[in-house]
Image (cartoon, rainbow, N blue to C red):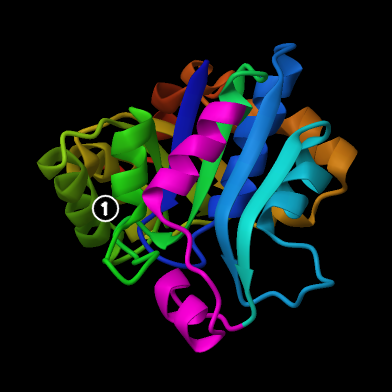
Amino acid sequence: MAIVVITGTGTEVGKTVATAAVAAATLAQGLSVAVLKPAQTGVAEEEPGDAAEVARLAGAVTAVELARYPEPLAPARAAARARMTPVGPTEIAEAAAKLSAVHDVVLVEGAGGLLVRYDEEGHTLADAAALMHAGVLLVAPAGLGTLNTTALTAEALRARKLTCLGVIIGSWAADPGLAERCNIADLPVAASAPLLGALPAQAGALEPEAFREAAPAWLAPQLGGVWDASAFSRVYAPAPRA
C-alpha cells in the first residue's frame, strides 16, 4: 500500500500538524492509517511524542516510534550524546514495509528537514525514502525565506530521483501579509510541485473532533480533502501594483 514521507523545509514548520491533517482526511475516506516517527528527539521518556500527537488529533491511527532521544538535536547527534543506538534508513524502510502490509496508508514523519542526519554514516530521511520508493510531501512556512528553502529541498529531492508530491503550507495566518499572499503562486514554482493545502494557524490547538471535521477543508483532493488551490489563490493573491 502507499507509503508517504512527510518532511519540512526546516524545524517548527508544522510537519506534525500537517501529518495529522493528512491522517484525518485519509481516515475520513474509510482507509486505515499508520504513522511512523523514525526518531523522536527532545521529548522525555514519559511525554507524548509527535506520533502520539498525530493520533490524538487525527483519531484511530497506528502510531509507531522507532527511537527516542532526550535532547532536542538532530537524530544522529542526539543518539551519540545519549550513547544510544541510532536509527538508519534500513530500519525505517523495514518498519514502514511491515506497517504497509496491514494498513492502507503509512505516513513517515521526519525530524527537521530532508537532509538531517540520522546516523554516523550520514544517512538521511531521503535515503529512507529511496529505499521505500516513497513520494515526499513537503511542509513549508508561508512567509519570507520560504522560497529558498523550498527550492533547495526540491532540488535535493530531484537530485536523488525522489518525487515531491506537493507542498503544504504548515501555518496560514488569518490576516496574511504581502509575502505570504504572493507565495501562494511562488511556492509551487519553487518546488516544481503543486500546492496541496494550507493549514490555518493554531490548527493543532483545536479540539480533536473539530480538527478531524475541518481537516479535509485544508487539503487538496489528492490528499483526501476538498481544498481548492485556485479558489484559495483568488481569495488571497494580491492584485498587481498600478
**Toward the viewer: 177 or 62?**
62
Q: Residue at x 55, y 38 (%)?
A: 95
Amino acid type at circle 1 is Thr
Q: Is residue 115 left or right of residue 205?
A: left
Q: Residue at x 53, y 48 (%)?
A: 109
The kind of secondary structure the magenta stretch mainly shows is helix
Rendered position, 193 above or below 85: above
From the top left corner, tell me how far across and down residue 173 is, in percent: 56, 56
How many numbered discs sit on the rendered protein? 1
Rendered position, 179 above or below 102: below
What is the span of residues highlighted in magenta in the rendered image? 71-98
Is residue 54 something one can see in this rendering? yes
Query: Which secondary structure lies at badge 1?
Result: helix
From the top left corner, tell me how far across and down residue 180 is, in percent: 38, 55
Q: Residue at x 84, y 72 (%)?
A: 46
Tell me which corner region of the image, top left, top right, bottom left or bottom right, holds residue 5.
top left
Q: Is residue 201 left or right of residue 182?
A: right
- Single out the residue that lies furthest toward the bottom: 81
Q: Is residue 146 left or right of residue 75?
A: left
Is residue 241 something one can see in this rendering? no
Residue 131, magenta (yes or no): no
Q: Which residue is mark 1?
A: 150
